[in-house]
Amino acid sequence: MKSNWSIDHPLNFKDAKIQPRDSMRQRSASPAPSSMSMKSDWSIDHPLNFKDEGIPPEHKSRKRSRSVSPVPSHLTMKSNWSIDHPLNFKDAKIQPRDRFYYCQLTERSCECLASALGSKSSNLRELNLNGNNIQDSGVNLLSAGLKSSHCKLETLRLGNCQLTHKSCEALASALSSVSSRLRELNLSYNNLQDTGVKKLSFGLGNPHCKLVILRLMYCEMTNVSCTSLALVLKLSASLLRELDLSGNKLGDAGLQILSAGLAHSHCKIETLKLSNCDVTDKGCADLASSLKSNPSHLRELNLDRNELGDRGIKLLSAALENPLCKLQTLKLWECGITDDGCAVLASALRSNPSNLRDLYLFGNKLRDSGVKLLSVLKDDPCYKLENFDLY
């Protein structure tokens, strides 16, 4: 529809004959318009014709308004239409994976979503609401659906939804529900603070909680939150495998507390992300100690953008030398490492060559001598190192 020819020749697929060379396949009849992008069977009986209809002035502006649609055309809700029309899933089928991120949704939409989650026909497994202004009131409404015995949701993303500690109480209640199936929860970029994490931990520690992945990036947490989380890690009932606390001011004091949980025999954490958490070489001492006490689970460790220095790397390398250490990915971007730190890392890998596959050292103070020490290991088939990222 990019040529002048199309103005005088409206599309009409009803009587058109599809040639053998065409890749278009006949579609089965649809009970309702699937979308207004001409991808539905509605277009067959309603050819486009722009010849007799001028373009309204308001459509020429940068932000164009859309005509009112009789039913939601997409479940992604990426239009201004959704602002004034609350969600209604009564006549629509929710797909196993639906995304509503950054759609200008508010708490009004959560009541409809909760109703859909609690319906007998619900088949939704993943719900992404990142970037919507649903606030605490919206989460309270949503939690009613999460606690329903019919809810099959496994992944819930609520990043940057203007939430506070008040939402954590409702979510903890949902996680504690007998019928809870949530396995992944993302609450990043919300002002939860230590109070919120403490409330959430009551749900995480419940025997009915099935959460495996928890993301709490940039939630205004301090070392106080680590006390609650460490207690959860020590529980035999905890199923947590991945914990992301990046962007919180935990400091060495927080890592010391968290390490006590990581060292516990019940801890099953496989992925730990602590990027930009104000950790120094002092924190590395406690972390290395926990790896020595419980070395068999951790597979990925992210310490990007912490001032560890060569001393911190030396402490971590002592844990890497342990034959029982199963660490496969180590991320150390912008950690103040020099060639001396590289030499220690290379020595640790030579002592335990069977596991580490990915090593990320971008943004450190490395020279040719340090790079060469690790490059030799990457090129040696006796070692498992596959990705060695410096730039």
Image: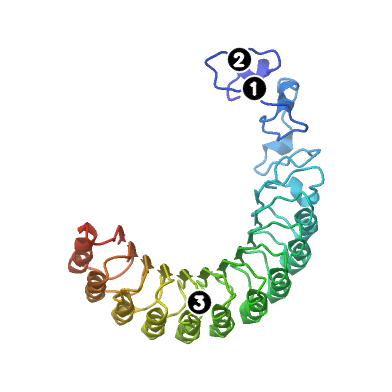
CA gap, disc 1 to disc 2? 9 Å
Q: Secondary structure at mark 2?
A: loop
Q: Label 2: how many residues lie within 10 Å, few (<14), some (14-19) or many (20+)?
A: few
Q: Quadrant of residue 345?
A: bottom left
Q: Amino acid at mark 2?
A: Ile
Marks 1 and 2, the one that precedes in the sequence: 2
| In the displayed structure image, the side of residue 295 where residue 196 appears, left or right | right
Q: Secondary structure at mark 1?
A: loop
Q: Nearer the viewer, residue 239 or 375?
A: 239
Q: Label 3: how many residues lie within 10 Å, few (<14), some (14-19) or many (20+)?
A: many
Q: Nearer the viewer, residue 320 or 302?
A: 320
Q: Quadrant of residue 389?
A: bottom left
**Viewport quadrant of the C terminus:** bottom left
Q: Secondary structure at mark 3?
A: loop
Tell me if label 1 and label 2 are in contact, CB under 8 Å.
yes
Q: Which residue corresponds to mark 3?
A: 267
